[in-house]
Amino acid sequence: MESNVPLAPLTTFGIGGPARYFCRVTTVEELRQSLDDARDKNLRVQIFGGGSNVLVRDEGFNGLVIKIELPGIVREGDTLVAGAGESWDGVVARAVHEGLWGIENLSGIPGTVGGAVVGSIGAYGQAAAQTVAWVEVLLNGERVRLNNSECGFGYRMSAIAGVVVRAAFALTPHGAPEASYVPELAGGSLADIRRAILATRAGKFPRLAEEGTAGSFFKNPILPPGEAKRLQERYPGLPVFSMPEASGVKIPLAWLLDKVLGLKGFCVGGARLYERQPLVIAAKKGCSARDVEHLARAVEEMMEERFGIAIEREVKTI
Ligand code: NAP
């Protein structure tokens, strides 16, 4: 266990203070040991994957941060079984390389396999949850295997308890492009689709070498169909999307922030709503967690005042 380890370099935001204690685990046994140590020393525990969906407070984390680095991707039939510490995009790349369909639209999403299943990632009409065969967690010192329905997947959330150590994704060699969000994907090969999605994402998110970000900071609001229709009547042109992972209708928050509130580029200190995708908060070098927090609160208040919609955050503050 190391002490006073800066967390900013371990996150894509590049912001925040140190962890009082920190360790990396590459085996389930190391993970079990670290959790036991934390319990014996009465330390709070924070699990870290790729650090792509977290905002670390300026004062840091007063406890033990455990970074999950459990490795391995194995093919079993048409299923890919991956360690929780593998990069999610590495799993997608492997699937595409092996001619397996089901997660190609999820190309280029940052973070680890563990983060991907716990956060129930989705993009461009696909959701990782649709392919999950099982998830293995370490819970109260026991390795437990959860099948898909036991994971309680919803929109950008799951009910998975414990620390994810492995997950299995059931794919198919006989798939077809999922082109309902992006019609240009129709007819493409797996490699074409991956290339197109990577290019789209590259145009939408800040370049991490230049600025920090945790991708979409807020979740898109999910409204009952009737409410979404009333909003569409008030704001003609507002697109709505049905969802693979939950009931209700998804409203593109970015559209409301841009077309109605005119908030593209809106900034507080070093934090601003990214010009090309205002759901994303971009952080200049030197930006503090406080700047991000103030910006996020301002957006939340404007959404509440103007539309009566209480938006939720996708990014977790630590
Ligand atoms: P991370 O940011 O390091 O951690 C985020 C949270 O995920 C942690 O606070 C922890 O939640 C949980 N977590 C991570 N690994 C876990 C594991 N092995 N077992 C249990 N919980 C775990 O995570 P990450 O690896 O970078 O992944 C972040 C997620 O956000 C990924 O799904 C990433 O793809 C997604 N993301 C999506 C987009 C998008 O555009 N859709 C953009 C950016 C990121 P608790 O604190 O509750 O334990």
Image (cartoon, rainbow, N blue to C red):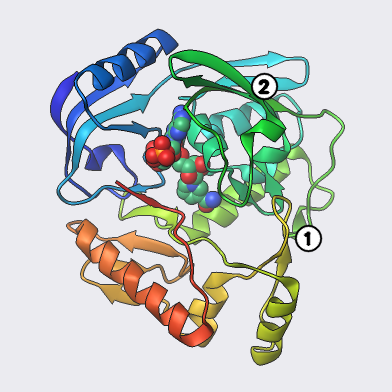
Front residue of this view, candidates 237 and 157: 157
Numbered circles on residues, count? 2
Q: Nearer the viewer, mark 1 or mark 2?
A: 2
Q: Which mark is residue 193?
A: none
Which residue corresponds to mark 2? Answer: 80
- Whichever of callouts 1 and 2 sits on the residue coming sooner in the sequence is 2
Q: Amino acid at mark 1?
A: Pro
Q: Secondary structure at mark 2?
A: strand
Quadrant in the picture for the N terminus: top left
**As displayed, is residue 227 above or below residue 141?**
below
Front residue of this view, candidates 99 and 153: 153
Q: Secondary structure at mark 1?
A: helix
At x 14% / y 48%, what residue is drawn?
Answer: 59
**As displayed, is residue 235 above or below residue 160?**
below
In the rendered image, the residue lying farthest to the top is 29
267 sits to left or right of 133: left
Residue 99 in percent (x, y) is at: 76, 28
Front residue of this view, candidates 160 and 173: 160
In this rendering, does residue 294 appear at all?
yes
Which residue corresponds to mark 1? Answer: 183
Q: Quadrant of ligand 1?
A: top left
At x 70% / y 70%, what residue is drawn?
Answer: 224
User: Are the two marked residues, 1 and 2, in contact with CB atoms closer than 8 angstroms?
Assistant: no
Between the C-alphas of marks 1 and 2, the distance is 27 Å
Front residue of this view, candidates 287 and 45: 45
Q: Amino acid at mark 2?
A: Leu
Residue 28 in percent (x, y) is at: 43, 12
158 sits to left or right of 103: left
At x 38% / y 78%, what residue is drawn?
Answer: 301
At x 76% / y 53%, what residue is drawn?
Answer: 185
Question: Is the residue marked by circle 2 packed among few (<14), some (14-19), or many (20+) residues within 10 Å?
Answer: many
